[in-house]
Amino acid sequence: MSLSPPAVLAVLYFLTVAFGAFLLWLPISHYDAVGVGEAIFTATSAVTVTGLVVVDTGAEFSLFGQIVIACLMQFGGLGLMVFAVVILSAFGIPIGMPHKVMLREDLNQATISNLGRLVRIIVTVSLGCEAVGAVLLAFVFVPELGWGMGLWHAIFHSISAFNNAGFALYPDSLSGWVGNPLMNITVTTMFILGGLGFIVVGDIYQHRKWRKLSLHSKLMIAGTLWLIVIGVVGFAVLEWRNPGTLAGLETTGDKLWASWFQGVTPRTAGFNTIDTAAMEDSTTLLTIMLMIVGGGSTSTAGGIKVTSLIVMLLATVAFFKRRPALHVFGRSLPLDQVLKVMALATISGLLMFASLFALTATQDIAFRDLAFEVASAFGTVGLTHGATAELNWAGRAVIIAVMFLGRVGPLTLGFFLAAKSRPRVRYPSDKVFLG
């Protein structure tokens, strides 16, 4: 019996996690503090480019284990994206025309034949950005750690940053460089580019003029800029007098750099330069909302995606203005786009609600911390209030499932939504009372 494309995709994600967990469980990968459960959790977090951890990555995993984690992050952010659009066809797995059309539209391609070009763009952009990032980060790590260890730390954090993975080799993430301009600029630039999406980066490189960019690229750029402003300004205003975060820093410059970093990192990056557990409740809620939104389609980021948020807002505006169609940047959006976004948002909301309910029923942890954990896992972000290490086996199982579904779910859902069918029977229309 042949599997459907969504089932094949889910199985291959699962097999990748299982193989990664086996490698991380081997004695050569760790220093006797990693069992089967820790290996499975870490492998899932790496493949889904989330960044939540139950053990200290830098202290508990050997160099071999860290290399395995880096490869899993790379394959999760880059390989599975490429795999999702071309490898099914390359292996001869039958894909119907509705699925091919969905892939073409989702990747903003004119024809199916452009997928080969897309793969080249993805590989070039990813490896190019990671190489530049590693060189720049080497100026930070090499003077402190020496050539060998410094270069490895630069490479590891470069891969983690571009793939929006959030894995760091330090227990406090990147807090040691809270005021370092090179660290702040390099890491944030990489995960912003990774979160924009390969299509957008390739579109910008090819056209370099706003009017020539595709509608998807315009929406992603505009939406990303607005979310960055909201995140950065919101964090600075809400945390400026908090002694546990910004007020505890020595200089105004450090406060501004920390505000910048923490304002953009919820977009599924997962790094932090301050203690996220010390944030105000208002800042925590803002961060949760940003984590749920995530980044762009065909990117290394998770979440419901920026374009989905924009479409929902446009649909709301169109409803109140009694417009029959959605208009933006001189283009109109069809109704099926709205229905797709509604389905994605509904399923995502139900998943997070059910997961949070399961955690509150099985964990003796504050509700705020559990809500933060669920949003971080679903958005494949990796930020935490410290609850990850406190989860029991049931809690870890829930978070593993949420990370897996947060990464695989939106893409597999797209396959189902792409398969259009004509009803054989038509029914008379009627009305129900809403609101």
Image: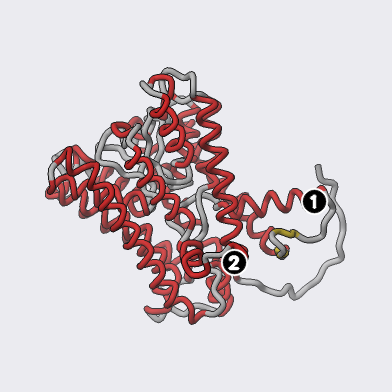
Q: How is the image coloured?
A: secondary structure
Q: Amino acid at mark 1?
A: Phe
> Between marks 1 and 2, how big is the CA–CA gap?
25 Å
Asked if one can make out residue 17 in the rendered structure from this viewpoint, the answer is no
- For residue 169, which quarter of the picture? top left
The answer to whether residue 192 is left or right of residue 158 is: right
Asked if one can make out residue 50 in the rendered structure from this viewpoint, the answer is yes
> 14 or 177: nearer the eye?
177
- For residue 261, which quarter of the picture? top left
Residue at the location (40% across, 66% down)? Answer: 122
The answer to whether residue 4 is left or right of residue 27 is: right
Q: Amino acid at mark 2?
A: Ser
| Image: 166 above or below 211 | above
> 48 or 316: nearer the eye?
316
Q: Position of residue 175 (x, y in %)?
A: 32, 32
Q: Position of residue 254 (x, y in %)?
A: 38, 28
- For residue 328, which quarter of the picture? bottom right
Disc number for residue 214: 2
Q: Quadrant of the C terminus?
A: top right
> 53 or 433: nearer the eye?
53
Rate crowding at label 1 as few (under 14), some (14 to 19) or many (20 or more) other CA atoms within 10 Å.
few
Residue at the location (36% across, 44% down)? Answer: 166
- Provide the secondary structure element on which disc 2 rests: loop
Q: Quadrant of the N terminus?
A: bottom left
Q: Position of residue 429 (x, y in %)?
A: 86, 62
Q: Where is mark 1, residue-wise?
A: 319
The answer to whether residue 275 is left or right of residue 144 is: right
Residue at the location (61% across, 54% down)? Answer: 308
- Provide the secondary structure element on which disc 1 rests: helix
Q: Position of residue 320 (x, y in %)?
A: 81, 47
Rate crowding at label 2 as few (under 14), some (14 to 19) or many (20 or more) other CA atoms within 10 Å.
some
Q: In the rendered structure, are the residues bearing label 1 and label 2 in contact, judged by CB atoms less than 8 Å apart?
A: no
